[in-house]
Image (cartoon, helix red, strand yellow):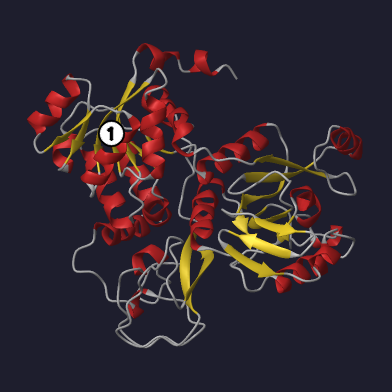
């Protein structure tokens, strides 16, 4: 594809956008926009403007703190990023798109709703809101005649794009998914495995380095050896919720298989059981954890599809080219090992802002929900509070299930539960439902979900 030709409309008339939430994703987007034609980031909003101002100063980005619409207009005229203290001042600026990257479910829902009402398109990075009310927001945007899209640079959009590419080519998808955010790196000499700053002994792991013919047994043995490290995290479940809702590809297990796997093994692991793999049937969504040596390439946070090939001749051809294929030459791995955050996000923003093209298709719907299940007895009044940067709520494990009919006993989406208190005691093993959690007095997120459920 010739991208410069495709995006000529944006090169001739740049997309004017504002950033909502200037974390690592947002700051990388601002930096990249300044290096390219076609995208102008003219304003930003963040709850910590002093931090953002310091970061922009370090990056050499001209900006001004703005306490009014007039100050924001003046900053824009001067060629500086208007760092607005109030959302209403930002939304009053001439904008084609806002990029919602706060990572806060309630705030993201409110920001997207306000932008759509103001006639501004939305590029949604905040998966925390999207996994709960994404279809409702997309529907509102369509009714208002403004674009709404997920954003390349994050795994959901990249995987949706890879799936659509495979489908266009007529490649049957056996499995699709992503790698967890951080690799599990083994020292072959000591059999110690590092994951982020943590280290864990894994004596005997090298005996299971080769997958062998007993795939399920090898996968189980590896998981047992690294039981002290997390193989499942909330963000992975959240991202795969978006993919399932956008593509219709559903998980094989509500907690994922989440195998520890070397990249070259995926075509064998992600085969149907009758072919020696772990899947109950072809066409499933899953997350895996990369197991590699220090000298091997990372796949951290990358996306993949395992596809069925037309014949074993094609499989042999691919194997000769170094493409990972299954031992029987019937399946191949196609993958993108990188997600480049704001560096590649402009592609989606330009596509939405000038071509009216969304990563999301017309059949986008709430097919699955990210839910929470108690891992211990929780007392009445207990607050479901996120701790750490992996969005984990102590005492709650994530899972994905098909979206249930609405009602007081319906399972409650994870990000509607966080920050709330339990109305009654919840025994271990129980999936949280609406009637177990204190409903907020006034929550746009909850209202949007009710609106979405009413339209099923």
Residue most extreme to the front: 189
Q: Which residue is mark 1?
A: 57
- Compared to residue 379, the image places residue 364 above or below, namely above
Image coordinates of residue 392 in percent, x first then y, are: 45, 67
- Residue at the (63%, 66%) spot, across then down: 199
**In which quadrant will I find the N terminus?**
top right
- Residue at the (49%, 51%) spot, across then down: 242
Q: Quadrant of residue 258?
A: bottom right
Residue 362 visible, this angle = yes
Residue 140 appears left or right of 364: left
Q: Give the class, few, some or many, for how many residues have Cα within 10 Å of label 1's Cα (few <14, many ≥20).
A: few
Residue 346 appears left or right of 51: right
Q: How many marks?
A: 1
Image coordinates of residue 124 in percent, x first then y, are: 38, 42
Image coordinates of residue 419 in percent, x first then y, are: 31, 69
- Compared to residue 433, the image places residue 110 above or below, namely above
- Residue at the (39%, 34%) spot, across then down: 29
Residue 403 visible, this angle = no
Element marked by disc 1: helix
**In which quadrant will I find the C terminus?**
bottom left
Image coordinates of residue 106 in percent, x first then y, are: 29, 56
Q: Quadrant of residue 281?
A: bottom right
Residue 220 appears left or right of 365: right
- Compared to residue 142, the image places residue 446 above or below, namely below
């Amino acid at each position: 594809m010739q991208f410069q030709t495709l995006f000529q409309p944006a090169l001739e008339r740049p997309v004017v956008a504002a950033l909502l939430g200037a974390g690592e994703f947002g700051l990388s987007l601002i930096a990249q926009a300044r290096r390219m034609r076609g995208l102008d980031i003219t304003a930003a909003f963040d709850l910590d403007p002093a931090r953002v101002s310091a970061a922009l100063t370090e990056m050499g980005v001209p900006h001004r703190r703005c306490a009014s619409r007039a100050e924001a207009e003046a900053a824009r005229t001067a060629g500086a990023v208007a760092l607005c203290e109030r959302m209403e001042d930002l939304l009053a600026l001439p904008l084609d798109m806002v990029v919602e990257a706060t990572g806060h479910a309630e705030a993201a829902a409110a920001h997207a709703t306000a932008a759509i009402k103001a006639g501004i398109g939305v590029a949604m990075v905040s998966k925390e809101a999207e996994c709960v009310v994404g279809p409702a927001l997309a529907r509102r945007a369509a009714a208002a005649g403004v674009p709404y899209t997920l954003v390349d640079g994050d795994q959901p959009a990249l995987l949706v794009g890879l799936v659509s590419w495979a489908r266009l080519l007529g490649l049957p998808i056996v499995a699709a998914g992503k790698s967890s955010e951080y690799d599990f790196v083994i020292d072959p000499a000591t059999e110690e495995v590092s994951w982020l700053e943590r280290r864990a002994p894994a004596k005997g792991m090298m005996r299971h380095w080769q997958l062998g013919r007993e795939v399920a047994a090898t996968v189980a043995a590896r998981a047992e050896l690294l039981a002290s490290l997390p193989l499942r995290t909330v963000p992975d479940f959240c991202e795969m919720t978006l993919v399932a809702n956008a593509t219709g590809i559903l998980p094989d297990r509500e907690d994922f298989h989440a195998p520890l796997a070397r990249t070259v093994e995926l075509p064998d692991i992600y085969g149907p059981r009758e072919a020696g793999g772990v899947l109950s049937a072809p066409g499933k969504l899953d997350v895996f954890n990369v197991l590699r040596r220090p000298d091997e390439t990372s796949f951290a946070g990358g996306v993949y599809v395992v596809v069925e090939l037309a014949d074993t001749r094609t499989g042999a051809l691919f194997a000769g080219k170094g493409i990972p294929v299954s031992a029987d030459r019937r399946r191949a791995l196609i993958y993108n090992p990188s997600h480049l955050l704001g560096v590649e996000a402009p592609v989606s923003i330009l596509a939405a802002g000038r071509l009216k093209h969304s990563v999301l298709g017309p059949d986008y719907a709430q097919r699955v929900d990210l839910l929470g299940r108690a891992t211990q007895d929780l007392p009445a009044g207990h607050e479901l509070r996120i701790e750490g940067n992996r969005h984990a709520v102590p005492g709650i494990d994530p899972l994905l299930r098909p979206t249930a009919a609405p009602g007081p006993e319906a399972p409650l989406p994870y990000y509607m539960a966080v920050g709330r208190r339990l109305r009654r005691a919840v025994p271990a093993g129980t999936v949280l439902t609406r009637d177990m959690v204190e409903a907020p007095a006034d929550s746009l997120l909850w209202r949007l979900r009710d609106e979405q459920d009413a339209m099923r």
